[in-house]
Image: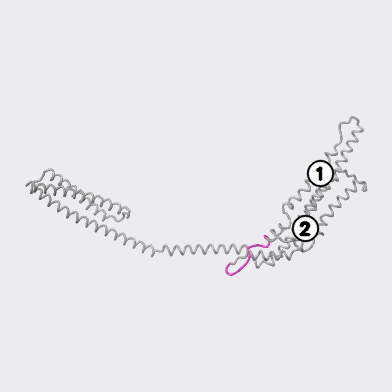
Amino acid sequence: MDKRNYQSGGSCFGIFFLLFLVPFIAVVLLSLGYTGVLSFKVEMHTLITLSIVFMIFLFFIKHNASYAACKISNNFALMEDSLQEALKANALTIMGKTKSTLTVRDFIEEYFKGIRDDNFARVASSVFPMLGILGTFIAIALSMPDFTVSDSGQLDREISLLLSGIGTAFYASIYGIFLSLWWIFFERRGLARIEESSLNLEELYGSRIWKKSELIKHEHMQTELKDQKIIQTLQETFSLDFIKDLNNQYIRNFKTIIDDTTNSFERITNHMEGVSRDLRKTIEQIDERKESVEAVATMKRDIGTFIEGVDCLNRGLEKFNGSVDHTFSKIDDELAGAVDKLGEMAEMIVEQNLSIQKKLSDTDRES
């Protein structure tokens, strides 16, 4: 908030003097009693205590609500200018209407805090009675007589002195309670003036400020609009047609992969059958040439193993064709494993062929 010179609009000396006058008159009367001008007795320590309490009261006067209300009244034009600036700074446009979110009451409270200290104002009504009670006990302690005397007449005088001191000591408590009541009267009076000014400003600027109910209503409307947009977006994103198309596309892609895999296995099977026929021919040639029995037995075992592998491969292919629930990763793993096995078997067959051809060539040279 813009800090302004609150004294520029006029003086509040009248309020200050009114708050000052009656407590000062009470101190003057007690001073006259102490000097003997008036007929009641006041002790020196009581007068000193009351003077200290009065000086503290003077420090609190500028924080009284009546004094602050006078400051606001004398600078009302400046405060109104600050209010208009604050309303503009907190303007909010909703559905084509521009109003302020700052309430007049909040502005007045903040403005009021810039004139006086609320902490001093809150404790003042309880500080003065406590100071008066403290002064009373101090005065009693200072006026306490000597009770160790042995003479009864002197003891009576000491008791009379004590009672006289106690009587004057209570003036401090009475004065503290009076200051508290005096403070509360002007405090409530000033707060009433501030409240009246707030109501007038609220009535004057009410059309330029968003009401709390309007802001809550707008917030609910915005929440409903967001919910509707979210629901609409979800409906557009996850519509039945979209899901159906996605499912059909998934099925088509899956069938394509299955068909390609099946064709690949068929080609591999045909190739392996061709290799098997070649091996059978080689075995027949070996049988005709009466080659090594051990080589033939070994080849037969290899061929039997190969045929079993082909049969297992065919059975696995049939099972694979009947199962469409396998995941793509498993299909890739099985295919990779099958290709590795076929590669190993092909390498083994090539090695056996080379070995057989070598033996055949050695036989031809020997013959």
When the figure is inspected, residue 90 is found, relative to residue 159, above or below; the finding is below
Of label 1 and label 2, which has the lower sequence position?
Answer: 2
Residue situated in front as seen by the camera: 147 or 311: 311
Residue situated in front as seen by the camera: 74 or 340: 340
Element assignment for label 2: helix
- Where, by quadrant of the figure, is residue 234 drawn? bottom left
Q: Are marks 1 and 2 in contact (CB under 8 Å)?
A: no
Q: Please give the range of residues in magenta.
A: 94-106
Quarter of the rendering occupied by the N terminus: bottom right
Image position of 309 (left or right of 240): left
- Check if residue 181 falls in the magenta segment: no
Residue 94 numbered mark, or none: none
Neighbour class for label 2 at 10 Å: few (<14), some, many (≥20)? many
Residue placed under numbered mark 1 in the picture: 135
Residue placed under numbered mark 2 in the picture: 67
Residue situated in front as seen by the camera: 49 or 251: 49
